[in-house]
Amino acid sequence: MSQKEVNGSSHRGKVLTLETMNQNVRQVEYAVRGPMVLRAVQIEEELKKGVKKPFTEVIKANVGDAHAMGQKPITFIRQVLALCAYPALLEDDKFPEDAKLRARRILDGCGGQSIGAYSASQGIECIRKDVASYIEKRDGGIPSNHENIYLSTGASDAIVTMLKLLICGEGRTRTGVMISIPQYPLYSAALTELQGVQINYYLDEDKCWGLDVGELRRSLTAAREHCNPRALCIINPGNPTGQVQSRQCIEDVIRFAKEEGLLLMADEVYQDNVYAEGCVFHSFKKVLFEMGPEFSSVVELVSFHSTSKCYMGECGFRGGYMEVVNLDPEVKAQLTKLVSVRLCSPVSGQALMDVVVNPPQPGEPSYATFTKERAAVLADLAEKAKLTEESFNNVPGFHCNPVQGAMYTFPRITIPQKAIDQAKAAGQAPDQMYCMKLLETTGICLVPGSGFGQREGTFHFRMTILPPKEKLKYVLEKIAEFNAQFLQDYS
Amino acid sequence: MSQKEVNGSSHRGKVLTLETMNQNVRQVEYAVRGPMVLRAVQIEEELKKGVKKPFTEVIKANVGDAHAMGQKPITFIRQVLALCAYPALLEDDKFPEDAKLRARRILDGCGGQSIGAYSASQGIECIRKDVASYIEKRDGGIPSNHENIYLSTGASDAIVTMLKLLICGEGRTRTGVMISIPQYPLYSAALTELQGVQINYYLDEDKCWGLDVGELRRSLTAAREHCNPRALCIINPGNPTGQVQSRQCIEDVIRFAKEEGLLLMADEVYQDNVYAEGCVFHSFKKVLFEMGPEFSSVVELVSFHSTSKCYMGECGFRGGYMEVVNLDPEVKAQLTKLVSVRLCSPVSGQALMDVVVNPPQPGEPSYATFTKERAAVLADLAEKAKLTEESFNNVPGFHCNPVQGAMYTFPRITIPQKAIDQAKAAGQAPDQMYCMKLLETTGICLVPGSGFGQREGTFHFRMTILPPKEKLKYVLEKIAEFNAQFLQDYS
């Protein structure tokens, strides 16, 4: 037997196959762009080719992609970006002075005054300063240091970077990371790829997807039997669940993290998306500092933000930042080194983040338009959140919590035993079968609850509330019709 | 002892410290943005504060960042980007029709006609089609399928993604990856992080940094004693070495990869940067297909390109692509799934890549200006490549190969024994000490050869040839002066 055959790399076969590839990558699942979406794209192709369907269009309600759903970009943001891309426009009197001011400030922070230059690995300094000012203002004056800000390629990139720093050890000492169930599957995907131990804590669907510290404790105690839990991830406002955490709840979580020696990762990308009466967004940073130095000088907290959500919905630019609090300075140096290997995050995304944290101020020429556009987007979302909740709660077999915030609804649905049995026989999750049938029947693409995690025996789906109101109404009607037929077919 | 203390997570200490972080990340080194650059940034701060230095400015010749060095963006590229960012400009008659045509085409490929929408995970379809056409044209008609194109966040992202798919196994079966020495340290950094086995093969400095298949074989045979070599990485034109591979050399490498069952990773981001008389860029894809079906239907090849280099130098946009050839369809599906977890690469970078692969054509209004701007950048680089080589070869103790291509020179320098001893006593690499003293004396920031790898006992540095000609002349003079003094001080 030759050396080549010993090494299994004979030229007769492929080097890379399902069997010889990294099995951690193979095990990764990411339902938001999983089999449902692959089928949706196929159906779109079929429609283009003239294949007859009981619908004329695929509606991708699987993902929080505001512009794809027809939301218009905020004028001021795009004016600044156009000026940064093509500075000759700085001489054009069709652009307002405040947009030019922002663009000049960003360009002054760039090497050679070009957004085509690499930035510092942590991000452009003046933008990090603007982010720090934004955080200070948002949090009622609690200081933020731009040296603790890292600009990133969307929030996803920053979250994965933090997990990379954290995850190590073998067997019982392997790092465990607590994530909510239901969760946003970036977390489970990253943990699978990095071979961290996923520790599930369940949100309480009957209490409006509330987080209960007793459940955190139960989950942590169980996990300590087999791994080394080191971090606790929170998504607030919640994805896919749409809950907005109370100040009290956040305090409880912080106290728990301190007692148990956990690093907190606060995913706050929906911080402007709060709709429900009486709900307010509280940042973990603010609550941490209001709890006094015995907490604020101790608890390691990393919080994440993004240009992709809120009122701007600029997903394609992959802008984001994280703020690190109480991180060991030597670890911070390691973090900076790690991000430097990829050189920098996209500078156009950094520029966009700058406009988000430094929008037009009263007295500036763009203030009125900007404020109007932002308010219109958020009011429209609030209305659609309400509409969706009410509509789904009228569907027999559905239970839908209020969409207090974020961009999704995650209703519990009833799947008859006969359908469950049929799905199981086909090796499918029952809610996956439900969503697939819905897609084939109506063209509406949702994500089955099994892609986010849910209590055994319950079934859900995630739907974004982003479609324009008339289309959303159509979607809600079609789902109700489909559900009635489904219940009848499997009764 | 409480459970908490057992797990080492008592609230008295930090969760994340140098000792408790992921040690693979801790071991990562990336010299291009390493200690030299950190010190350079400090010196800049000191200069700003009025600290007196023997120079007035820090010159960062450590990185291939064209715009930061004063190169102007290509007008047509930025016009298209501005139109994409702010489509109201499509009504502006100051923009040429061909730029509008490109922008409309890109916007038509975006969800909601906005570059703020997420794209498909693999990238916008019409852009992937343009990339495939570009490759076909470049390679004399050899077909390219857009389904094999993945748009990425710069080439770095795509390279790391491929390494993630590849690296697995334990102990002697752990995946080994062959990289040239000297290498671009993204490769060593990614291998360290992913715990792949780095297999060094040495380029022949005495043969103009040529690649010799005998050396590949030596390196592979040695590696097979302790790991499972599965991939061979090539950088052509070379970084940091600047060599351009002959067609014959590429054929030899392909033949070797086929015989030995290795997947080929061809880093071709400098494909337009070829300056030396008689040198031509040959893509691995083209040579592979010209070698006939016994090769072209077998060898797994992934080639990488970027918006950051060539004549455009648009590093900040983080645009790039890879083309995969002969990849197992099941592995391709896994690749698509893996990239989908990060949703998509920056759409503005995708748009920029589109302009690069689909530039103005003869007869279009922007053709003359575009062609002139591109030619001027490349002619200027060619002149600076020549100037640098000639100048360094006049410095006593320097030996500098021709800069046939890419953007760097990597001269061998002489470090007297006394200096070597002093560096070693201080726990420093001798060329690191050399570069640090150069920085402190002249403000010129280079990267020591030890950051790229070099034969034991030889010393080098990498310097980009990007500074404007007058500044480059100044840099070359200052380095010569410094070197003379250094040799004298340590003689």
Image: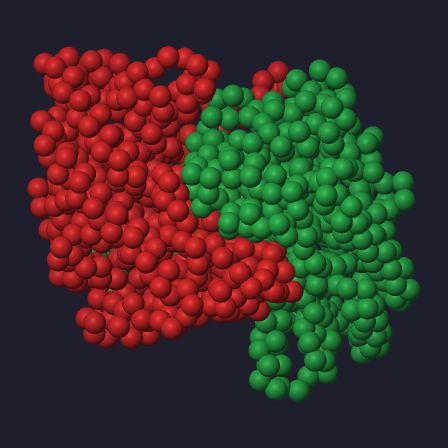
Chain colours: A green, B red
Q: Between B136 and A301, which is closer to the camera in this rendering? A: B136
Q: Between B116 and B284, which is closer to the camera in this rendering? A: B116
Q: Is residue B98 visible?
A: yes
Q: Where, by quadrant of the figure, is residue A413 drawn?
A: bottom right
Q: Where, by quadrant of the figure, is residue A324 drawn?
A: top right
- State whether residue B330 is above or below residue A235: below
Q: Quadrant of the N terminus of chain A?
A: bottom left
Q: Is residue A171 visible?
A: no
Q: Quadrant of the C terminus of chain A?
A: bottom right
Q: Where, by quadrant of the figure, is residue B55 drawn?
A: top left
Residue, x 70% and y 63% (percent of image)? A70
Residue A347 vs residue B133: left or right? Answer: right
Residue, x 89% and y 40% (percent of image)? A278
Residue, x 79% and y 49% (percent of image)? A372
- State whether residue B266 is above or below residue B454: below
- State whether residue A339 is above or below residue B288: above
Q: Position of residue A151 (x, y in %)?
A: 55, 38
Q: Position of residue B483 (x, y in %)?
A: 17, 22
Residue, x 72% and y 80% (percent of image)? A55
Q: Between B263 and A421, which is closer to the camera in this rendering? A: B263
User: How many numbered discs sit on the rendered protein?
Assistant: 0
Residue B69 vs residue A432: left or right? Answer: left
Q: Position of residue A271 (x, y in %)?
A: 73, 41
Q: Position of residue B346 (x, y in %)?
A: 52, 53
